[in-house]
């Protein structure tokens, strides 16, 4: 990812850096310092304050619990000719700002920042920014992603003192052309995709004498990627994590399974990281949890219910295809470069050809069992068993399903999705399906 512009990160410790106009198709090796437009911030002593932030950062590394930096306000100002983004922080931190194309975005990388912003912040755009989101990107690393309506330049970036230790990060964006945006950054793609290496990397061997089946629960989205939002701005990432935790507790309680989760808190995990974890564990079953929302208001009150998806390269129907497209966009939403995951996407299509028929059959079998069990406790969508090319389901050796628990956009569904008793009953149904699935497999193996 172009964020791997290592020099900018190092420079960020000294002051606010901007590595601008990183176009799609640029990979790490292609970038040379000074090649893209590198704007020195018009910061008034920005590096001074950033230096002040340093002891705090190292303290964080040593003790693991420093006083967190908080963001208590984020806002947009200006119009189409120049749009400003402001982020108020409780103390100065190093920041790195850069742009990405396909789609056009501005990324602000910060250390671990706690966002205390009102629900719905970032939903409404202004000027050149159509929306923005924020959250944890990885351990100790936060990110703000601004979606822009067209290619932009970072014309100004500064961190000024608000009083005490508090600072305001201000970034000004001005319009530019697609050509200027990519100028000097149109590096060559890496010549060959590391297909073999990728395919073999970290694949755990399933031990023959494994006592308990390994189950990997995958709550979708997280951190900077909120997933779908309900009308009251309840994010999908919270709902699916709550259900995932309940499911984990219940599965573990049976004593029959070794249960893992791809994330246990509000942090972003890329689709590749999720797949890698599954491979590493050599999981026997992978359950991805999501909750959808539909954008068209006219259907919001009629479309509801749960759906179980399995993998197929050709989608079972148009809705399923769109759903996979939406869920596969998670990496782009978090500001990972398109080039990176496009390239990995190719690798995945190679992998998919190698998918074992057996794995697909087991996935279908689990999907059947699951729908039967879910039907007893939750309302299902009109066509509750579908298939499409979900990246996270591309697993050669692990039977996997993706459950869309319901529609965040539907009033009744939203109420249920956030209700702990409903979450528990869904988790119970999934446990019953898991039990039935493994009981059948064990019986066959005898
Ligand atoms: Zn989702």
Image: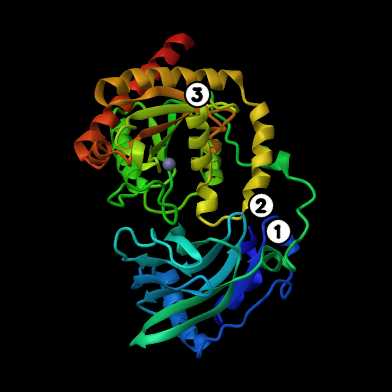
Please report contact status of discs 2 and 3: CB closer than 8 Å, yes or no: no
* Mark 3 residue's CB less than 8 Å from ligand 1: no
The residue at which mark 1 appears reads as 26
Horizontal and vertical percent position of residue 283: 49, 32
Q: Which one is in front, 398 or 203?
A: 398
Closer to the N terminus: mark 2 or mark 3?
3
Dot 3 falls on a residue whose secondary structure is loop
Q: CA distance from mark 2 to mark 3?
A: 41 Å
In the rendering, at what x and y percent does residue 151 appear?
61, 64
Q: Give the distance between the C-alpha atoms of the residues marked 2 and 1, in whole angstroms.
A: 7 Å
Q: Earlier in the sequence, mark 2 or mark 1?
A: 1
Picture quadrant where residue 287 is located: top left
Mark 3 lies on residue: 209
Task: Say whether residue 348 is visible.
Answer: yes
Label 2, secondary structure: give it: helix
Residue 446 visible (yes or no):
no
Relative to 29, residue 237 above or below: above
Q: Residue at 41%, 50% (x, y): give it.
A: 222
Judge whether 372 appears above or below 379 on screen. Answer: above
Judging depth in this view, the residue of 350 and 169 nearest the camera is 169
Q: Position of residue 196 (x, y in %)?
A: 72, 39
- State which tag comes first along the sequence, 3 or 1: 1
Judging from the image, the colouring scheme is rainbow
Q: Quadrant of residue 149?
A: bottom right
Ligand 1 positioned in quadrant: top left
Q: Which residue is mark 2?
A: 339
Question: Where residue 288 sits in the image (x, y, percent)?
Answer: 43, 35
């Amino acid at each position: 990812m172009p964020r791997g512009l290592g020099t900018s990160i190092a420079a960020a410790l000294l002051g606010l850096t901007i590595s601008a106009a990183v176009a799609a198709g640029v990979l790490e090796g292609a970038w040379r310092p000074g090649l893209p437009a590198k704007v020195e911030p018009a910061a008034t002593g920005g590096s001074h304050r950033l230096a002040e932030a340093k002891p705090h950062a190292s303290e964080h590394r040593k003790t693991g619990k420093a006083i967190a930096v908080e963001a208590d306000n984020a806002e947009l100002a200006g119009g189409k000719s120049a749009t400003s983004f402001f982020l108020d922080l409780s103390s100065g931190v190093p920041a790195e700002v850069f742009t990405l194309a396909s789609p056009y975005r501005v990324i602000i990388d910060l250390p671990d920042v706690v966002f205390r912003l009102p629900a719905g912040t970032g939903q409404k755009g202004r000027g050149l920014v159509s929306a923005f989101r924020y959250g944890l990107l990885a351990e100790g690393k936060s990110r703000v992603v601004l979606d822009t309506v067209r290619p932009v330049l970072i014309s100004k970036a500064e961190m000024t003192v608000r009083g005490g230790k508090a600072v305001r990060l201000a970034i000004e964006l001005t319009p530019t052309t697609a050509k200027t945006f990519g100028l000097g950054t149109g590096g060559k793609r890496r010549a060959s995709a590391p297909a073999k290496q990728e395919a073999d990397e970290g694949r755990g061997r399933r031990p023959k004498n494994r006592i308990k089946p390994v189950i990997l629960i995958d709550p979708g989205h997280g951190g900077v990627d909120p997933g779908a939002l309900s009308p009251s701005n309840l994010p999908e990432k919270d709902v699916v994590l709550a259900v995932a935790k309940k499911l984990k507790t219940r599965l573990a309680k049976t004593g029959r399974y070794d249960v893992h989760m791809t994330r246990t808190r509000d942090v972003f995990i890329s689709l590749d990281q999720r797949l890698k974890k599954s491979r590493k564990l050599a999981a026997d079953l992978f359950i991805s949890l999501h909750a959808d929302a539909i954008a068209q208001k006219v259907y919001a009150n009629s479309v509801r219910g749960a759906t179980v998806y399995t993998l197929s390269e050709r989608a079972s129907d148009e809705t399923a295809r769109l759903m996979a497209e939406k869920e596969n966009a998670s990496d782009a939403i978090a500001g990972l470069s398109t080039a990176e995951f496009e390239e990995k996407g190719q690798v995945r299509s190679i992998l998919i050809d190698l998918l074992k028929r057996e794995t697909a059959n087991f996935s279908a079998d689990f999907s059947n069992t699951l729908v039967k069990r879910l039907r007893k406790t939750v309302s299902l969508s009109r066509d509750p068993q579908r298939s499409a090319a979900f990246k996270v389901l591309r697993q050669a050796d692990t039977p996997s399903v993706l459950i869309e628990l319901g529609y965040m956009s539907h009033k009744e569904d939203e109420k249920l999705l956030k209700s702990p008793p409903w979450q528990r009953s869904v988790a119970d149904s999934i446990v019953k399906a898991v039990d039935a699935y493994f009981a059948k497999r064990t019986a066959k193996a005898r």
